[in-house]
Amino acid sequence: MEAFSDLMKSIAQGKFVYTGELEPHKSVDISEVVDWARTLRDTGRIVAANVTDNPRSVGAISSLAASFIIQRETGLEMVYQLRASDRNRLALTSDLLGAAALGIRNVLCLTGDHTSMGDNKESMPVFDLDSAQLVKLTHMLVYEGKDLAGNEVHGPKPRINIGAVANPGQEQLEMEVLKLERKVQAGVEFIQTQVVFDAGAASKFLDEVKNFGVAVLIGIFPPKTYAQADFFDKYVPGVKVPPEMLGTLKKFKEIENKEERKKKINEYNTEYFVDFIKEIKKKSACKGCHIMAVGYPDVIKPIIDGVK
């Protein structure tokens, strides 16, 4: 493995890294997303930020175009998300070469949600490759200068570091570990996980994958409301919110003063996730934390400062 990106260079230097999340929408105007990227950059501790690619199969502006614009405007390094659900291997190869030409240095390889989940339900899903095969394609382009069919890339090889995802909260944890092992064999270099609220579940997953030799960034989502936490607990596969967190957030609903309620929630999230990150940092496989707190700047810097 070579470290092409600031993210991977930081990990190689033994730093505990933080990444953030950006979610452009169905619009050509991404000024709000650029502003959010500046907020993440100005914490001084977020080394890179993900740009989502049609999350939940809802059509949005190209993740590649958005990644390039945001990185150019803010100087914050991007993690370009790329779904296999919408593209065959030709299109995926083209987008990866395009990303490299535009100076994108990280790609997160995703299988992607089925198109029937999204806002264009008649769309034909592709799924020519899954995430592990997309990792292999990217690895071949970067380290062999060839596509999956063995066709050579003309000129210099792309300089991209390769990421993928995992879900520590899956009930069938053994199957999740086997899926990750397949991605490791394909050449993945870093992993960002689905949201985890339980430090015990995160620690168990980290113990299971510690011998894979791949950097793992555990995903967290500080909820701004009880409703957000309840939604994750009920409807997001593989994600469970501890009953004590749900109970505490539910009690905060009883605080009538809006500013006081917000203050209590901010304080609770900061304390909870500082303790959470301190716990997972003890595990050798854990090299960082992926903070999915879009539009919630109140807690990002306090959490990072509290851990430090």
Image: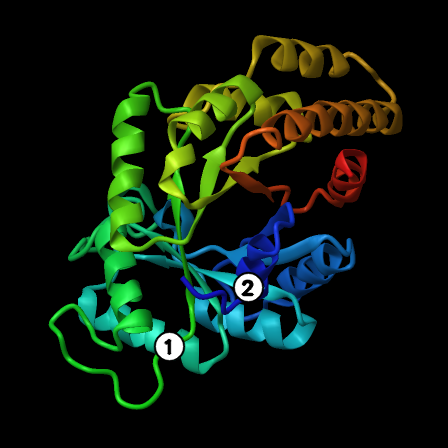
Please provide percent x and percent y for residue 204.
45, 21
Residue 78 is tagged as: 2
Image quarter hosting the N terminus:
bottom left
In the picture, measured across the screen, residue 74 lies left or right of residue 202, that is: right
Direction bottom: furthest residue: 155
Please provide percent x and percent y for residue 282.
61, 29
Per the model, the C-alpha gap separating discs 1 and 2 is 16 Å
Binning the other alpha carbons within 10 Å of mark 1 as few (below 14), some (14 to 19) or many (20 upward) gives many
Residue 158 is tagged as: 1
Please provide percent x and percent y for residue 25.
51, 58
Element type at mark 2: strand
- Give the residue type at disc 2: Met
Element type at mark 1: loop
Numbered-mark total:
2
**Residue at x 28%, y 76% (from the top left corner):** 94
**Residue at x 43%, y 82% (from the top left corner):** 101
**Residue at x 53%, y 55% (from the top left corner):** 50
